[in-house]
Amino acid sequence: MTFAEQFPIVFDALNVGFVQTLKLFAVTLLGALPLGLIISFGSMSRFKPLCGAVKTFVWIIRGTPLMLQLLIIYYLPGLAFGNPIWGSGESGRFVASAVAFIINYACYFSEIYRSGIQGVPVGQQEAGQVLGMSKKQIFFKVTLMQMVKRIVPPMANEIITLVKDTSLARIIALQEVIWAGQAFLKGSQGIAGQLWPLFFTGVYYLAFSGILTILFNKVEKKLSYFKI
C-alpha cells in the first residue's frame, strides 16, 4: 500500500482518536475547574481536621504519577469487588479516565486557586467590610476579580499540560489520538510497521496547544486593565 493510499486511512483514524482526546480534555475541565475551587476552600478551612484531610489528599494526588492513578481507578474496583464499576468497552474506559483526570487536575487547580485567593491583600477585604459588603459580595466583587487576574498564567500552563497528558489514557487502552497513531505501528486496517502516523499525532497537539496559547494571550490582554 502506497503512502497516498495510506494517508486517508490514517488521517480518518487520527481524527477519530483526536475527537476522543478533545472529549476527555473538555470533560476534565468542566469537572476539575469547579471541583478545584471547592478543594481550595477545604484546604483554607479554619476547621483543622478538614483542612488537614484535604491537604493530605492533595499532597497524595500531586505526589503520585497520573498514570498510576489511572491504573488504580480503572482496575482497583474490579479487583476489590469482583465487578468493574465503570462498565465495559470504550465508554467504561472513558469514564474511568475522566474521573482520574478530574481528580488529578482539580488538586492542581486547587493550589492555584488557593494562592490566588491568599494573594489578594487582606486590606482590600477589610475595606469591603467597612463599606458594608457581605462576605459573599466581598468574595465575588473584590477577591474573585483580582484572583482571576493572578491565576490566568499558571492556569493556562496547567490547561496546556492537560492537552498533552490526555495521551496517558492509552495506558488503559482508551483510543485517543496517540493510541490511534501507535495502532498503525502494530498493525491496523491493513497497515503495519509504519512509524510516521505516530509522529504525525504531534501535529494535532501542536495545533491545539497553539490555539489555546493564542486564546490565553488574548484573555491576559483583556484582563490587563485590572492592575494588581
Image: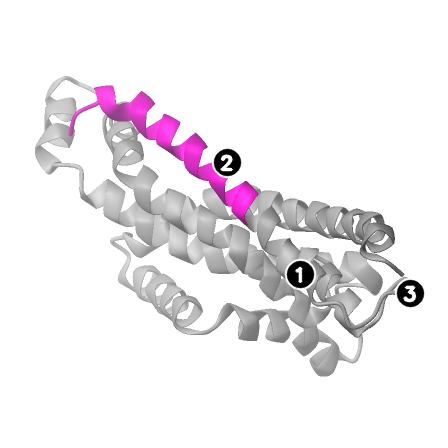
Which amino acid lies under the numbered mark 1 shown in the image of this protein?
Ile
Looking at marks 3 and 2 on the same chain, the residue that comes earlier in the sequence is marked by 3
The span picked out in magenta is 206-228
The one nearer the camera, 192 or 47, is 192
The image quadrant where one finds the N terminus is bottom right
Q: Is residue 7 visible?
A: yes
Mark 2: secondary structure: helix
Mark 3: secondary structure: loop
Q: Tell me which residue sits at (24%, 24%) in the image.
A: 224
The image quadrant where one finds the C terminus is top left
Name which quarter of the figure residue 149 lies in.
top left
**Crowding at mark 1 (Cα within 10 Å: few <14, some 14-19, many 20+):** many
Above or below, comparing residue 209 to residue 145 in the picture: below
Q: Which residue is mark 2?
A: 211
* Mark 3–mark 2 distance (CA, rounded to whole Å): 34 Å
Which amino acid lies under the numbered mark 3 shown in the image of this protein?
Gly
Q: Which residue is mark 1?
A: 178
Looking at marks 2 and 1 on the same chain, the residue that comes earlier in the sequence is marked by 1
* Mark 3–mark 1 distance (CA, rounded to whole Å): 18 Å
Q: Are marks 3 and 2 in contact (CB under 8 Å)?
A: no
Left or right, 18 with reference to 37: right
Give how far across and how far down residue 129 sits, in percent.
15, 25
Left or right, 2 with reference to 151: right
Residue 197 part of the magenta-drawn span:
no
Q: Which residue is mark 3?
A: 190
Disc number at residue 134? none
In front of the other: label 3 or label 2? 3
Mark 1: secondary structure: helix
The one nearer the camera, 152 or 98, is 152
Q: Tell me which residue sits at (50%, 48%) in the image.
A: 32
**Crowding at mark 3 (Cα within 10 Å: few <14, some 14-19, many 20+):** few
Q: Tell me which residue sits at (67%, 66%) in the image.
A: 170
